[in-house]
Image (tube, helix red, strand yellow):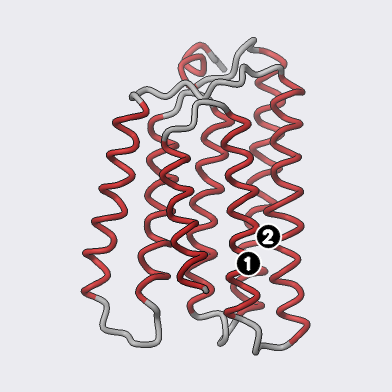
């Protein structure tokens, strides 16, 4: 069942590469939160109930509900156009993300540590590099925030591979990192939205001290 959920998560990365609308990005992130909830519940069912509850709350409350609603608020607050405005065509992005998944699959063959499942390694690295690709090829700052959250989901999946040993330490660190990053970037986007009519990377060149 975990493998099925992780495969669905990987498919969501492919869908993310061809998404044209910011709301679609947000919905995919919320969907990924649901998938991570299922993976965490199945993988960590044997750990301390308190630790398990914290991990599950992080995925279902924060990743699935709070962050998508917060990002949707930023878009409406700043009247940002709903298009993602990529530098490259969606077809090229789909090819690149597909190649990323294939390369990480090939790299997984070099893993010799039997304590880490290869599928976790493949999916987590695919998410991390896909997030980096989104950040590099999208114009809007808000889309860079979304790309960062995809990267964080990849890190979260990798942490689940060793979650039975130290779930609380890993996930609390990730949760605090998300809180700090999303709020800082959210404030940043709000302030820039007060100055610029449309928030994209090109307009940052106009900013001066």
Whether 175 is drawn above or below 95: the answer is: below
Q: Residue 120: horizontal and vertical position, in percent?
A: 42, 70
Which residue is pictured at 74% across the width and 23% down the height? 76
Task: Name the spot of residue 159 as percent of width and height, x first.
Answer: 52, 72
The residue nearer to you, when weighing 203 against 107, is 107
For this view, does 83 lie left or right of residue 14? Answer: right
Q: What residue sits 37% from the left and 28% below the top?
A: 90
Residue in the image at 46% along x and 41% along y: 15
As drawn, 106 above or below 204: below
Q: How many marks?
A: 2
Is 134 placed above or below 60 here? above
Q: Is residue 142 left or right of residue 92?
A: right
Q: Say left or right for 43 vs 175.
A: left
Image quadrant of residue 63?
Answer: bottom right
Which quadrant would residue 33 be assigned to in this image?
bottom right
Which quadrant of the view contains residue 176? bottom right
Q: Nearer the viewer, residue 129 or 89?
A: 89
**Residue ID for mark 2:** 176
Q: Position of residue 140 (x, y in %)?
A: 52, 25
Q: Residues within 10 Å of mark 1 (few under 14, many from 20)?
A: few
SS for dot 2: helix
**Where the C terminus falls, by quadrant?**
top right
Q: Which residue sits at x=76%, y=85%?
A: 49
Residue in front for this viewpoint, 50 or 184: 50
Spatial CA distance of label 1 from label 2 is 5 Å
The residue tagged 1 is 173
Residues tagged 1 and 2 counted as in contact (Cβ below 8 A):
yes
């Amino acid at each position: 069942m975990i493998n099925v959920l992780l495969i669905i998560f990987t498919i969501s990365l492919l869908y993310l590469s061809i998404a044209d609308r910011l709301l679609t990005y947000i919905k995919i992130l919320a969907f990924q939160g649901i998938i991570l909830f299922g993976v965490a519940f199945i993988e960590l069912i044997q750990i301390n109930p308190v630790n398990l509850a914290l991990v599950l709350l992080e995925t279902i409350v924060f990743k699935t509900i709070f962050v998508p609603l917060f990002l949707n608020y930023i878009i409406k607050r700043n009247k940002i156009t709903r298009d993602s405005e990529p530098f490259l065509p969606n077809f090229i992005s789909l090819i690149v993300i597909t190649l990323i998944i294939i390369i990480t699959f090939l790299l997984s063959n070099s893993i010799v540590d039997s304590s880490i499942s290869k599928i976790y390694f493949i999916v987590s690295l695919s998410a991390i590099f896909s997030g980096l690709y989104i950040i590099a090829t999208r114009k809007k700052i808000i889309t860079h925030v979304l790309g960062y959250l995809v990267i964080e989901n990849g890190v979260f999946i990798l942490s689940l591979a060793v979650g039975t040993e130290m779930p609380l330490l890993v996930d609390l660190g990730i949760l605090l990192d998300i809180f700090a990053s999303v709020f800082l970037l959210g404030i940043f986007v709000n302030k820039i939205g007060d100055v610029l009519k449309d928030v994209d990377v090109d307009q940052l060149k106009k900013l001066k001290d």
